[in-house]
Amino acid sequence: QAEVVESGGGLVQVGDSLTLSCASSRLTCSNYDMGWFRQAPGQDRKFVAYITGGGRGTSYADSVKGRFTISRDNAKNTVYLQMNSLKPEDTAVYYCAAGSGGGSDQRFYAYWGQGTQVTVSL
């Protein structure tokens, strides 16, 4: 079983919103920086957003800046990715990851979920 588990993916239309969740029953997420990454068909996995353990620092890929918001609720041991104004190019498998000091660099994330599919249709 993966240390973190994503949920909330689905099929939506262009312009819709969707919120992904990432939770763990094995890790204390507040001890980690948490990141979201995505992999579209035929492409490498890419950085989407990350949030520091304390929740004060966030960073986003240029492609999602202004549309996506990452947040965390340490009391619920959960991290969220609110996605607004979805576009077809947002279609991908979205992965949650936990690590330290990684920011957008996947190599610094030690724990990964199995991913959740997001499909944005015209």
Image (spheres, rainbow, N blue to C red):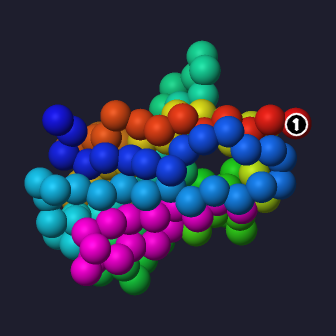
122 sits left or right of 71 in the view: right
From where the camera sits, is residue 111 visible? yes
Please give the range of residues in magenta: 70-84
Image mark count: 1
From where the camera sits, is residue 59 visible? no
Residue 82: give x, y in percent of width and height.
58, 64
76 sits left or right of 11 in the view: left
Amino acid under label 1? Leu
Q: Residue at x 74, y 39 (%)?
A: 120
Q: Write down the residue under mark 1.
A: 122
Q: Is residue 14 above or below residue 71?
A: above
> Is residue 76 a member of the stretch shown in magenta?
yes
Q: Residue at x 31, y 47 (%)?
A: 5
Give the quadrant of the C terminus: top right
Residue 90: give x, y in percent of width and height.
69, 42
> Observer-nearest residue: 75 or 50?
75
Give the quadrant of the N terminus: top left
Instruction: Kindly report the secondary structure that dominates the magenta region of the rendered protein.
Output: strand
Q: Residue at x 77, y 55 (%)?
A: 16
Quadrant of the rendered image containing residue 10: top right
Q: Residue at x 38, y 65 (%)?
A: 79
The outermost residue toward the left is: 26
As helix, strand or loop, the secondary structure at mark 1 comes to loop
The outermost residue toward the right is: 122
Q: Residues within 10 Å of mark 1 (few under 14, many from 20)?
A: few
> Observer-nearest residue: 44 or 119?
119
Residue 51: give x, y in percent of width and height.
40, 68
66 sits left or right of 122 in the view: left
Residue 35: give x, y in percent of width and height.
39, 55
Q: Is residue 85 above or below residue 45?
A: below
> Is residue 9 a member of the stretch shown in magenta?
no
